[in-house]
Image (cartoon, helix red, strand yellow):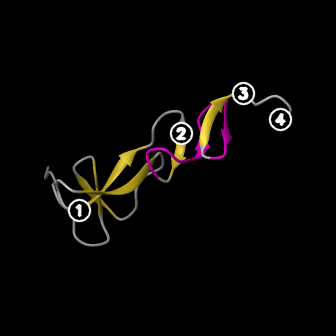
Amino acid sequence: LQTCTLCAASYYLFNNSCVNECPQSTYMTFDSTTEGYICKSCVSPCFRCTDSTSCLSCIGDYVLNGTICQEGCYPGYFV
């Protein structure tokens, strides 16, 4: 089994493998250490995200408020 440390153009490093798109619950970012693009895990409770601070959807009972996942709704809001 080979372990990748850098990927060709249009591929991203994820768990020591090169993938053509980042898996669910990860986002693509540039890694200055490897000087290539990698897939990093979304911060919980994000399910899908665009970067380390911007959620697109949430896990479980969390609710998306803008780009942040929170437990429950703000007063006056409902799901």
Total labels: the figure holds 4
SS of the residue under disc 4: loop
Which x, y percent locates residue 69?
61, 36
| Camera-nearest label, 1 or 4 | 4
Q: Which quadrant of the rendered structure holds the C terminus?
A: top right
Does the magenta portion include 38? no
The amino acid type of the residue labelled 2 equals: Cys
The amino acid type of the residue labelled 1 equals: Gly
Mark 2–mark 4 Cα distance, whole angstroms, equals 20 Å
Q: Which mark sits nearer the N-terminus, 2 or 4?
A: 2
Marks 2,1: beta carbons within 8 A: no
Q: Is residue 2 shown above or below 20?
A: above
Write the residue at 49% across / 54% down. Answer: 50
Which x, y percent locates residue 54?
53, 47
**Left or right of 62 in this view: 7:** left
SS of the residue under disc 2: strand
Q: Which mark sits nearer the N-terminus, 3 or 1?
A: 1
Mark 1–mark 4 Cα distance, whole angstroms, equals 42 Å
The amino acid type of the residue labelled 4 equals: Tyr
Which mark, by number, is residue 77? Answer: 4
Query: Which residue was labeled with disc 2?
Result: 46
Task: Characterize the local packing of mark 4: few (<14), some (14-19) or many (20 or more) Cα atoms within 10 angstroms.
Answer: few
SS of the residue under disc 1: strand
Query: Which residue was labeled with disc 3?
Result: 72
Write the residue at 45% across / 51% down. Answer: 51
For residue 75, which quarter of the picture? top right
Which mark, by number, is residue 36? Answer: 1
The amino acid type of the residue labelled 3 equals: Gly
**Left or right of 58 in this view: 51:** left
Which contiguous range is marked in magenta?
51-66
